[in-house]
Amino acid sequence: MTLRINEIAPDFHADTTQGPINFHAWIGEHYAVLFSHPKDFTPVCTTELGYLARIEEQFIRRGVKIIGLSVDPVKSHLGWLDDIEATQGAAVRYPIIADEDLHIAKLYGMLPAEEQEGTARTAAQNATVRSVYVIGPDKRVKLLITYPMTTGRNFDEILRAIDSIQLTAKYKVATPANWNSGNDVIIAGSVSDDDARRLFPEGWDAPRPYLRIVKQPGDQDAAPSA
Ligand code: BEZ
């Protein structure tokens, strides 16, 4: 199955390091980041989960809950947490799902393709790749990115994208390339110039009629980038 932006993120029941959950109920009124990693006790994954533990506060400030996933059992996840804290300098406080039967991995398309059609999956192909899903309080997929097993993710980019997603959900703007919270934004193409004059009474710069640049609306100190 291929998930697409704006689709409802599939709901599921799962065992986690913090007990059983129903995914949608666990998200509640928050945003959520669901991320998969290939395997416990592996080096890149250790740095990823440790980095997320170090910046978890940045997600909490934005009203975002974090949850990890791999196909390893809860017992393995729990054993690994000590290593992450000892080597990465922060304790993992977010839950990690044990998707032992690959139910969620298949539901979300987190498994890599078989290398050859018709051949049995190898153990490596039964491990989840590095997928990230940002899900809104409406339970719809707002962003999805997948990295290969050998490439650790940039979680600062996920925070940056969440800032844009939350800003553009509230105001009729879009954010330009490499934008960070506090930078100028672009008036959404769906807004007519007449409506823009009402929404942005201080005016805008328009190097082209379709490129209308304004100061970022709202409280810029609410959730500064990491
Ligand atoms: C790692 O986390 O280091 C890793 C896991 C699976 C495949 C390759 C690297």
Image: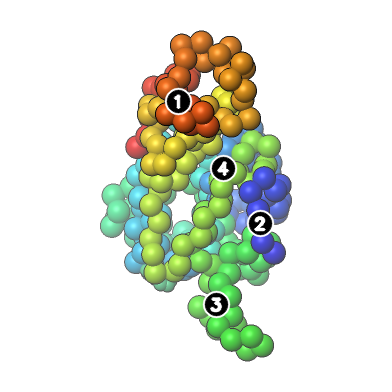
Inspect the image, locate mark 3, and give the three-letter code of the amino acid beneath it: Gln
How many numbered discs?
Answer: 4
Q: Nearer the viewer, residue 224 or 124?
A: 224
What whole-number distance in Å separates the C-alpha atoms at marks 4 and 2?
A: 16 Å
4 or 1: tag closer to the N-terminus: 4
Across and down, in percent, residue 59 comes to 45, 37
For residue 179, say whether it is visible.
yes
User: Looking at the rendering, which quadrant does residue 128 occupy?
Assistant: bottom right
Is mark 4 in CB contact (under 8 Å) with mark 2? no
Q: Earlier in the sequence, mark 4 or mark 2?
A: 2
Where's ligand 1: which quadrant? bottom left
Tell me the element at label 2.
loop
Query: Contact, CB < 8 Å: mark 3 with mark 4?
Result: no
Density class for disc 1 (Cα within 10 Å; few <14, some 14-19, many ≥20) is few
- The answer to whether residue 62 of the structure is visible from this angle is no
Q: Give residue 110's mark.
A: none
Q: Marks 4 and 1, how far apart in space?
A: 35 Å
Q: Give the number of the disc on residue 125.
A: 3
- Tag 1 residue: 206
Contact (CB < 8 A) between labels 2 and 1?
Answer: no
Q: Specify the label residue 32 is tagged with.
A: 4
Choose the circle earlier in sequence order: 3 or 4: 4
Three-letter amino acid code at the position of disc 4:
Ala
Q: Confirm if mark 1 falls within 8 A of ligand 1.
A: no
Which secondary structure, mark 3? helix
The span from disc 3 to disc 2 (Cα, nearest Å) is: 19 Å
